[in-house]
Image: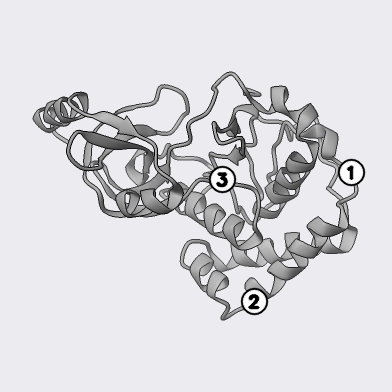
Amino acid sequence: MSPNDQQAAESQESERVPIVLSEEDAAPLLRDAPVIGGHRMQYGSNYTFLVALDAGEGKYLRAIYKPQKGERPLYDFPPGTLYKREYATFLLSRQLGWPDVPLTLVREGPHGVGVFQHYIEADPQMTYFELAEQHKDTFLKFAAFDFLVNNADRKGGHCLLGTDGRIWSIDHGLTFHEQVKVRSVMLEFWGVEIPQPVLTDLEKLRSSLETGAKLADSLCELLSDEEMDALRQRLEFLLTEKMHPVLDPGSDIPWPLV
């Protein structure tokens, strides 16, 4: 986006008011609506933008935009793949039924292809550390999911308490590596038994990851063959061991914690 285009977009945004829509109503805008404004969010090592999508006369919808071009090269993840991992995590969460991951789509934006995600209205002061005591059952699922997708960046601030009362899981770019790289602040679940209802959900997921299944086909377009095999292996580990793995507190905790 050129400076002139940026200035014009900011002008359009300033003349409108933000609206909050259900996921169903937001989906068409998230998929097709022009970006009419926005800015880069200051936290994070990769470029993340809070953008405004044209929602009709006098209105705009907030969304999160993470372009491929804004991904910082990493020594252990293939370049230009983080946005695909965000989308793969969303697809897997919806098939499994948990955790709540905001609606995420792949599309073109002002800086090229990337993911657009439904913006969650939330209290920024409420992180995992403030929520953990009252939402243990929810976060037990988060912990199982983080091992399943091999989440290398489960910080406390990647758990949001939405104004809708739901606990949302965000920031899933560092996932699905073929080597175990789980890093999480949820130490209290390490070595804890996984309840049967959670195991039942995981068991149902098994057939969806078989070659030829709709979810498996979608994930194969986003991940390597080795990463798909590793995903299936982690699922079998959870179903066989029926417990969260015990990780290393010396190396398997992200920094910063929030």
At 60% from the left edge and 61% from the top edge, which residue is drawn? 227
Can residue 238 be seen at all in this image of the molecule? no
Indicate which disc, 2 or 3, sits on the residue closer to the N terminus.
3
The alpha-carbon separation of the residues under discs 1 and 2 comes to 28 Å
Specify the label residue 76 is tagged with: 3
At 42% from the left edge and 53% from the top edge, which residue is drawn? 24
Residue, disc 2: 210
Question: Outermost residue toward the bottom?
Answer: 212
**Mark 2 element type:** loop
Q: Amino acid at mark 3?
A: Asp
Q: Amino acid at mark 2?
A: Glu
Q: Nearer the viewer, residue 24 or 207?
A: 24
Q: Nearer the viewer, residue 235 or 94?
A: 94
Q: Select label 3 or label 1 by which is in front.
A: 1
Mark 1 burial class by Cα count in 10 Å: few <14, some 14-19, many 20+ = few
**Mark 1 element type:** loop
Residue, disc 1: 191
